Image (cartoon, rainbow, N blue to C red):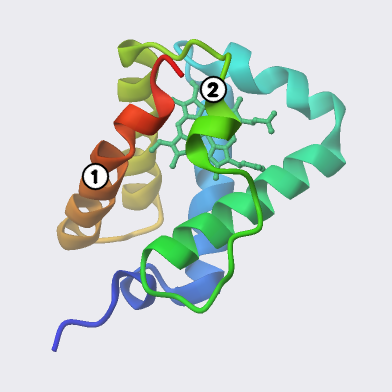
Amino acid sequence: MTPSLYDRLGASAGIAKLVDKLVELHLANPVVKQRFLPYLESPERVGEIKRHSCAFLAMGTGGPAEYAGRSMPDTHRGMNISDAEYMAVIDDILAAARACGLGDDVQKDLLSIAWSLKGDIVRQ
Ligand code: HEM
């Protein structure tokens, strides 16, 4: 039996590393960095967003976590996120996975989760 995506991501420690890398890449990505730079002024909010993102990913990949953050449409409502921004975030997800040494199978599974959420996030 194939291990769950949660286990292939390296369980909670692997997911925390992936989310840290992802935030680092978003802050350097010219297409989306303006969305995230203002949060650097509230480090406690950055910590909360990271915790929520870890729980969201753990919950969606077969892990034990309970996600206590807002729904994806509620989180991204009013941001008017474009297709180009969505693609940039997907590029960062795959680059973060590669930087964390995660293999092609994991990248493919992350990509399909990301695509399945597109309608909840773009132009909400
Ligand atoms: C697969 C795509 C995406 C997923 C799974 C995702 C997931 C999340 C999650 C779990 C949070 C934390 C929610 C909370 O703390 O309550 C969040 C926050 C956020 N996301 Fe996304 N997101 C995605 C795409 C995007 C895109 C394309 C953008 C814009 C370029 C974006 C911008 C933001 C911002 C600015 C926040 C902070 C919102 C706030 O708390 O004020 N996200 N996202």
Q: Is residue 4 visible?
A: yes
What residue sits 54% from the left and 22% below the top?
28
The image shows residue 24 at horizontal and vertical percentages of 57, 36
Q: Foreground residue, 43 or 99?
A: 43
Q: Is mark 2 within 8 Å of ligand 1?
A: no
What residue sits 60% from the left and 17% below the top?
35
The image shows residue 89 at horizontal and vertical percentages of 40, 29
Residue 23 image-quadrant placement: top right
What residue sits 54% from the left and 43% below the top?
71
Which one is in front in this view, the residue at disc 2 or the one at disc 1? Answer: 1
Q: Which residue is mark 2?
A: 28
- Secondary element under disc 1, as helix, strand or loop, is helix
Q: Which residue is mark 1?
A: 111
- Sequence-wise, the earlier of marks 2 and 1 is 2
Q: For the N terminus, which image quadrant?
A: bottom left
Q: Is mark 1 within 8 Å of ligand 1?
A: no
The image shows residue 80 at horizontal and vertical percentages of 49, 10
Residue 76 image-quadrant placement: top right
Q: Amino acid at mark 1?
A: Leu
- Secondary element under disc 2, as helix, strand or loop, is helix
